[in-house]
Image (spheres, helix red, strand yellow):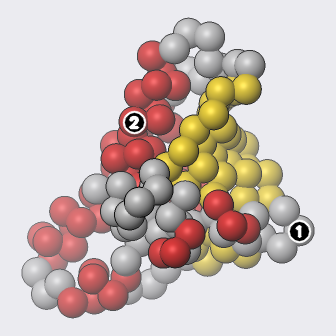
Amino acid sequence: MSEDAVVSEVRGAVLVVTINAYAMRNSMGAPGVRDGLLGAQDRFESDPDLRVFVLTGAGGVFSAGGNLDALRRIREVEQIRERLAGGGPLLKRVLTSDKLYIAAVEGPAFGAGLGLAAACDLMVAAEGARFCAAQI
């Protein structure tokens, strides 16, 4: 992927973080997304001047979630658990932080994307936002 999968911008005390993998509908499973989000969280949590983390998605899509097709192909329960646990560090940081996390949702927030948005302290949804919990 030639562009950064996650881009961030400081606006005063706010770190605006955008999932920028639109070709894959900002999927949590797109190359670089999880690592990019963890890196943005590292920056946010370590900078005392940053107080608010705003998470959004590029192109009018918050996140299409994870790669369900890949999960469906896995036959071992333990492998599915390991795959799903990949989002654990992201969620744990959001849920345990003393700082404010806001999800700014436009378009779809599905599966793992919905989970991440729901873990935030506040979710602001555009009129056309759509939410769906995945079933595998």
User: Where 9 falls versus 104 (above or below)?
Assistant: above
Q: Quadrant of the N terminus?
A: bottom left
Residue nearest the viewer, comparing 116 with 35: 35
Q: Residue furthest front?
A: 2
Gap between marks 2 and 1 measured at Cα: 30 Å
Describe the element under mark 2 as helix, strand or loop: helix
| Mark positioned earlier in the residue sequence (2 or 1) | 2
For marks 2 and 1, give the one nearer the viewer: 2
Q: Is residue 133 left or right of residue 29?
A: right
- Residue 111 seen from this side: no
Provide residue 13's location: percent of width, then percent of height. 70, 19
Residue nearest the viewer, comparing 136 with 9: 9
- Residue 49 seen from this side: yes
Badge 1: how crowded within 10 Å, few (<14), some, or many (20+)? few
Describe the element under mark 1 as helix, strand or loop: loop
Name which residue type carries label 1.
Glu
Number of callouts in the render? 2
Q: Residue at x 60, y 49 (%)?
A: 18
Give the numbered dot on residue 39.
2
Q: Which residue is mark 1?
A: 127
Provide residue 3's location: percent of width, then percent of height. 47, 56
User: Where 12 falls versus 7 (above or below)?
Assistant: above
Badge 2: how crowded within 10 Å, few (<14), some, or many (20+)? some
User: Where 76 falls versus 27 (above or below)?
Assistant: below
Q: Quadrant of the C terminus?
A: bottom left
- In the rendered image, which quarter is residue 19 located in? bottom right
Give the numbered dot on residue 103.
none
Name which residue type carries label 2.
Gly
Q: Is residue 60 left or right of residue 1?
A: right
User: Where 116 falls versus 111 (above or below)?
Assistant: above
